[in-house]
Amino acid sequence: MRRIYTCFPEGRFKALTLSYDDGKITDRRLIDILNQNGLKGTFHLNSGYFGETKGHRVPYITREEAADLYRGHEIASHTSTHPTMARMPMEGNLQEILEDRKTLEEISGYPVRGFSYPNGVHGERLYQLLRSCGIAYGRITKSSKRFDLPDCFYAWKPTCHHKEQLMEHLDRFLDTEYDQRLMLFYVWGHSYEFELDHNWELMEEFAKKAGHRDSIWYATNIEVYDYLKCAENLVYFADLHGVHNPGAKDVWIQADGEIHRIPGGQTYLF
């Protein structure tokens, strides 16, 4: 019987994504590090605090700079003003999400579909609310310490915070060879932590070692989500002699050890 496995783009089995919250001015330095090393990240922004300086140890970026600053990365929601959502009425949460989405979409020029929960508080009622607001996924703060794909995109566990043995996780990610499972290394945090902890060299070392590797797919959170959904929607012939890709994106698979690109909107025969 034919053995078929899903791959990441270009037939890879490893992917790396990063996720950083709040939209502080320290994102400028972080993005410069990512860009230099070919890494891609998702930045969850509180649009209600754009340009705020009073009462904050690290100021927020301005609305005017956001589009250029995050170009090539993903702008995602973190609510407008960062409330603890479990203590809020759903009407308030609805306004926080939609107001943030509308402002961020005006800036980015594309639908904002990503989310991270303020203070990491989440639950089934919030998952349902995100769905109704057009949000595709929600990242939580509990680390898995693994490289698994998410079981639930509305409770998407990262591999680790950058303070949690980051380089040790990277070494394990780079050194591990799986012949069946896809590996997703997901790092999260706040860029201002590097400034407050005086350890920018940690991210510089990580990015330099992790970046520019042909064996790794570097993607934003929404790119990972969209790709996996497209792969999930492939329709195979009953005898596995071919597959139809109903989506617009190309998907890569491995069939009996050979890599195949399945073009979007086409039927492909092995």
Image: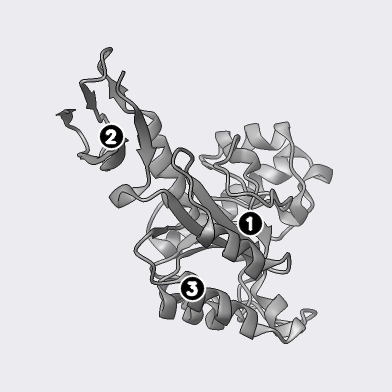
Question: In the rendered image, which quarter is residue 170 located in?
Answer: bottom right
In three-dimensional space, the C-alpha distance between marks 2 and 1, rounded to whole angstroms, equals 29 Å
Which quadrant would the N terminus be assigned to in this image?
A: top left
Identify the secondary structure beneath mark 3. helix
Identify the secondary structure beneath mark 1. loop
Q: Nearer the viewer, residue 95 or 169?
A: 169
Q: Which amino acid, by three-letter code, is at mark 3?
A: Ala
- State left or right for residue 252 relative to residue 76: left
In three-dimensional space, the C-alpha distance between marks 1 and 3, rounded to whole angstroms, equals 15 Å
Mark before the other along the chain sequence, 1 or 3: 3
Crowding near the residue tagged with mark 2, few <14, some 14–19, many ≥20 C-alpha atoms within 10 Å = some
Against 40, is 10 above or below? above
Res 44 seen here: no
Q: Residue furthest top?
A: 238
Res 17 seen here: yes
Query: Which residue position is annotated with label 1?
Result: 78
- Residue located at (64% from left, 74% from top): 191
Query: Which residue position is annotated with label 2?
Result: 247
Query: Which residue position is annotated with label 3?
Result: 66
Against 124, is 32 above or below? below
- Residue located at (62% from left, 44% from top): 156
Q: Which amino acid, by three-letter code, is at mark 2?
A: Gly
Q: Nearer the viewer, residue 145 or 136?
A: 145
Identify the secondary structure beneath mark 2. loop
Q: Nearer the viewer, residue 96 or 111?
A: 111
Mark before the other along the chain sequence, 2 or 1: 1
Dot in front, 3 or 2: 2
